[in-house]
């Protein structure tokens, strides 16, 4: 009886909540998938089962890949996201290390100011940034996004890495300084190898924010072949009050796969980056 009781408790306390969570998490992807492969007559019909496909079709995928600039949008998004992520991580590592490890006067206030800078909404910053981009002559180019994305990526990554660097014992640096190592050698040979999980966590967040960014991409890019996925799918597949739902869902589904792949591939590093570093 105790076994049955414990088993029933596990069903109600573990499996049912977990099943509800998984269903809530995966149902949007399922809905995007069936909508992407449904013919138009099924999409617009009120008859039949809305959660299943009677006659699958590839017409929406064909329209998306061969009648729009979707492959170019995908390449633009990958290029901008990867470059902006690496630039932001490089700057954030130096800033976080200086704030947390050099112990200079006003370091706490500087860290707080960086965190507060992350809280400034992009909807406020895109107006002055548009003026800067226009004066630099890089409006409607990928470089405009590569230079503006770090404005919200660097504060976030710096704040995240500050907490991770704080958990690395100071004794490691002190021993290296006694042995004659420079600050750059300490950073490159001791701190960064220990901070790989934290770097991956910050990189995943930065890549995701860059991949899903909409306001800057909508403001600074006007040419169809330069647009990123979030903007291209919305602006090119919606014609007035006509929504090409099949192609829209196919574009959303294919656009979410790279981010899901990155998360699944680095999930172990991501979790360890969120839970801490080297213990003293």
Image (spheres, grey):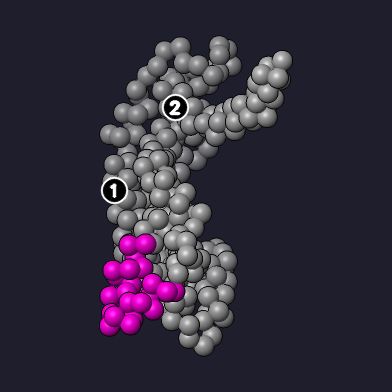
Asked if residue 180 lies in the magenta stretch, the reply is yes
207 sits left or right of 27 in the view: left
Assign the N terminus to one quadrant of the image: top right
Q: CA distance from mark 2 to mark 1?
A: 22 Å
Residue 150: x and y, percent? Answer: 41, 66
Residue found at x 40% / y 32%: 250
In front here: 160 or 81? 160
Residue found at x 45% / y 33%: 249
Asked if residue 5 lies in the magenta stretch, the reply is no
In front here: 165 or 55? 165
Determine whether 59 is above or below 272 in the image. Answer: above
Q: Is residue 57 visible?
A: yes
Residue 236: x and y, percent? Answer: 40, 43
Residue 149: x and y, percent? Answer: 41, 63
Task: Identify the magenta region.
Answer: 170-194
In front here: 48 or 112? 112
Q: Which residue is mark 1?
A: 75
Q: What secondary structure is marked by label 2? A: helix
Q: Which residue is mark 2?
A: 33
Q: Quadrant of residue 195?
A: bottom left
Main SS type for the magenta part?
Answer: helix
């Amino acid at each position: 009886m105790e076994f049955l009781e414990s088993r029933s408790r596990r069903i109600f306390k573990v499996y049912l909540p977990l099943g509800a969570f998984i269903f809530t998490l995966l149902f949007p992807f399922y809905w995007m998938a069936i909508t992407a492969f449904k013919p138009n007559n099924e999409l617009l019909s009120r008859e039949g089962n809305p959660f299943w496909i009677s006659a699958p079709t590839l017409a929406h995928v064909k329209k998306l890949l061969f009648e729009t600039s979707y492959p170019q949008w995908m390449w633009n998004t990958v290029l901008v996201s990867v470059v902006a992520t690496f630039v932001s991580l490089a700057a954030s590592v130096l800033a976080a290390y200086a704030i947390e490890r050099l112990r200079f006067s006003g370091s706490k206030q500087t860290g707080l100011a960086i965190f507060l800078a992350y809280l400034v909404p992009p909807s406020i910053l895109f107006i002055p940034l548009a003026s800067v981009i226009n004066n630099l002559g890089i409006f409607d180019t990928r470089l405009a996004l590569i230079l503006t994305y770090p404005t919200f990526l660097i504060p976030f990554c710096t704040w995240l890495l500050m907490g991770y660097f704080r958990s690395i014992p100071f004794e490691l640096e002190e021993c290296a300084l006694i042995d004659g190592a420079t600050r750059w050698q300490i950073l490159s040979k001791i701190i960064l190898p220990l901070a790989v999980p934290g770097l991956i966590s910050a990189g995943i967040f930065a890549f995701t924010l860059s991949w899903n960014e909409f306001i800057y991409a909508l403001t600074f890019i006007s040419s169809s072949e330069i647009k990123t996925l979030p903007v291209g799918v919305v602006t090119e597949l919606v014609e007035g009050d006509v929504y090409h739902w099949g192609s829209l869902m196919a574009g959303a589904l294919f656009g979410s796969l790279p981010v899901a792949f990155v998360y699944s591939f680095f999930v172990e590093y991501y979790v360890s980056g969120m839970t801490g570093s080297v213990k003293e």
